[in-house]
Image (cartoon, coloured by chain):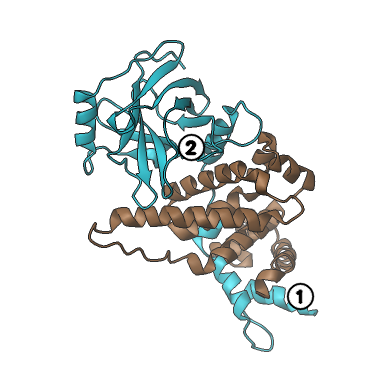
Amino acid sequence: MTTEDSRAQYMASGASEGGESHERLDLIRDVLSTDSTWAEPPPQVADGLLAALAVEAVPGPAVIQQRSGRWALVLAGAGGLVAIAALVLGTMNVIEDEGDNVVAMSGTELEAAALGEAEFGPNEAGWWIRLDVTGLPPAPEGSYYEGWVWSDDGEGVSIGTFHLRGEDTPIVLWSGVPLADYPSIWVTLESEDDGPEASELIVMKGRISQIPEA
Amino acid sequence: MDREVLERFRLGDEAAVKAVYDRFGGPVFALSMSILGEHGLAADATQQTFIKAWRAASTYDAGRSFAPWIYAIARRTAIDLYRKRARVIVSEDVDVVSFPIGLETVWEVFEVRSALDRLPDEERQVIKMSHFDGLTHVEIAERLDIPVGTVKSRSHRAHQRLIEMLKHVEEA
């Protein structure tokens, strides 16, 4: 029996003829027996990835980052999000869409100079949303911008992140939830040290008034 | 991984990204699971990993091994997600985030899964039934309705291949 044969046999059985132990092979055997090692990614991962890439019209990489399906669901009831929703829906001017799947986006008082559009359209995995913004400064180091779609019931879903620090235009985001049910589009400023829920720092907003059939 | 595919990946080619995902999606997901321990979060981390890789593809040197490059992105992405999640759970008064319990063996998980995904399906199946399901050769033979001798030969070949593919892990 060759050395390799004996090691293969040890990996298979955990025992050797001479009784010696093989610490690293034991570790590999442990890894072979764990759930994580055999776990299969759900098909939504590939779907979401391809959907995100598919909407990129420009050659080469650009920014797209997506929390897909169930992963993205963030309940607005937690923390101050209900208050945020009430504030936004109650006191801020809501910019309606301009037709042809284009929504006007406006800066809030936090970024009053920000202006732009959100173009959107269906794809196999949901909706792509392309942001074209001006006047929004690069997110400071340690922070990033996050796009959200919100329902009128105050439920928000992340549609991706970007930071505008040089290499990430166009901004293409992706929603796995129907825009008809989540018609408000927000952009928040998030800290890298914070949790996945939306911050209270809403910097841009827009609202879709009519959703075409997907 | 085919060098031509990696070169196209480096240029941001979508089909190449898909090919890379088909090859490394499993190892990245396994790594993410070992750190995050939850399917939804691991799926999120996996998708973010490939999007980050695509965004950074122009920085990849196609002359070098791809696995360590995507491994580094995957590990960082999963740990970042773990930290963000940990901060959600921990009280606002306590800004202490422990390391994920699976962090010590995350490289081994990535490498072992990479090797498993390169095995022929029938050999991979026997390895899984033996190590993960804990079945004997006789039990595997009954489940698969094949002779015990066939199970033994597949198992032997599979373990030999694993020993060869995981030599660097064994010697680390």
Query: Going by the image, does B80 lie left or right of A47?
Result: left
**How many numbered marks are there?**
2
User: Mark 2 or 1, which is nearer the eye?
Assistant: 2
Q: Nearer the viewer, residue A38 or B150?
A: A38
**Residue B141 appears in the figure:** no
State the mark number for residue A5: 1
Q: Nearer the viewer, residue A110 or B109?
A: A110
Q: Secondary structure at mark 2?
A: loop
10 Å neighbourhood of mark 2: few (<14), some, or many (≥20)? some
Q: Secondary structure at mark 1?
A: helix
Q: Which residue is mark 2?
A: A164
Query: Going by the image, does A37 lie left or right of A163?
Result: right
Q: Which residue sits at x=22%, y=39%?
A: A77
Check the rendered structure and report the hue given to chain A. cyan
Residue A30 lies, with reference to residue A144, above or below; the image says below
In the image, residue B112 lies at what x, y percent? 62, 62
> Which quarter of the figure is the C terminus of chain B placed in?
bottom right
State the mark number for residue A50: none
- Chain at tag 1: A
Distance (Cα) linking label 2 and label 1: 55 Å
